[in-house]
Amino acid sequence: MSDMLIVYYSQIQGNTKYIIDKCEKEFNADIIRIDTVEPYEGNIDEISAQAEHEIFLDFKPEIIPNDIKIDGYKKILIGTPTWWYTMAPAVLTFISSQNWAGKNVALFATDAGCPGHCIEDMIKLCKGANIFSTRTFEFNLHGTNYMITPEKDLKAWIKEIKSF
């Protein structure tokens, strides 16, 4: 077991996974992808409409069981795409199911130019955690893995997490 856990959800275009791939090269971390029991299907517009409906209802989809136990990790990094100004519902399910008291947590979100209140919402749910870093990364709305945020900003953020 590593001293760092990375937990993320990535769906439509894989932009959050792009950040995770960069982190994986830099950290000796355990990495767990969150997946929903019932996957989102359809084109980007259909998935977006479903996500909007779920977020409006504060819906927490069932996630595929895994061995996620945050106890024992020195640092926990959580990543999500921004869906309708907040975190993906699967991340809401995960964060809501954990005890964050005393945990050192870094949060990031990917977005297409409107980060909304995603990070703030995640912080509120991580009650009792020491949030030591947050970051949003902007991507082109219509291009997979085309990051608008300068690569140097991503590298600086990774260095910040390493130094904590």
Image: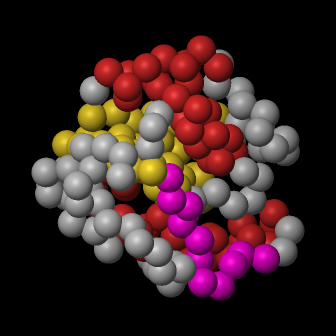
Viewer-closest of 111 and 144: 144
29 displayed left or right of 52: left
Q: Residue at x 64, y 25 (%)?
A: 149
139 falls in the magenta region = no
32 falls in the magenta region = yes
Note whether residue 19 is visible: no
139 displayed left or right of 144: left
Q: Residue at x 72, y 31 (%)?
A: 147
Viewer-closest of 103 and 42: 103
Res. 104 image quadrant: top left
Specify the quadrant that holds the C terminus: top left
Note whether residue 14 is visible: yes
Residue 71 in the image: x percent, y percent?
Answer: 23, 60
Residue 49 in the image: x percent, y percent?
Answer: 72, 72
Q: Residue at x 71, y 37 (%)?
A: 139
Give the vertical position of 149 relative to 1 (above or below): above
Residue 79 in the image: x percent, y percent?
Answer: 50, 49
Viewer-closest of 148 and 25: 25
Res. 127 image quadrant: bottom left
Q: Residue at x 65, y 19 (%)?
A: 150
Residue segment shown in magenta = 31-41
Give the vertical position of 95 relative to 29 (above or below): below
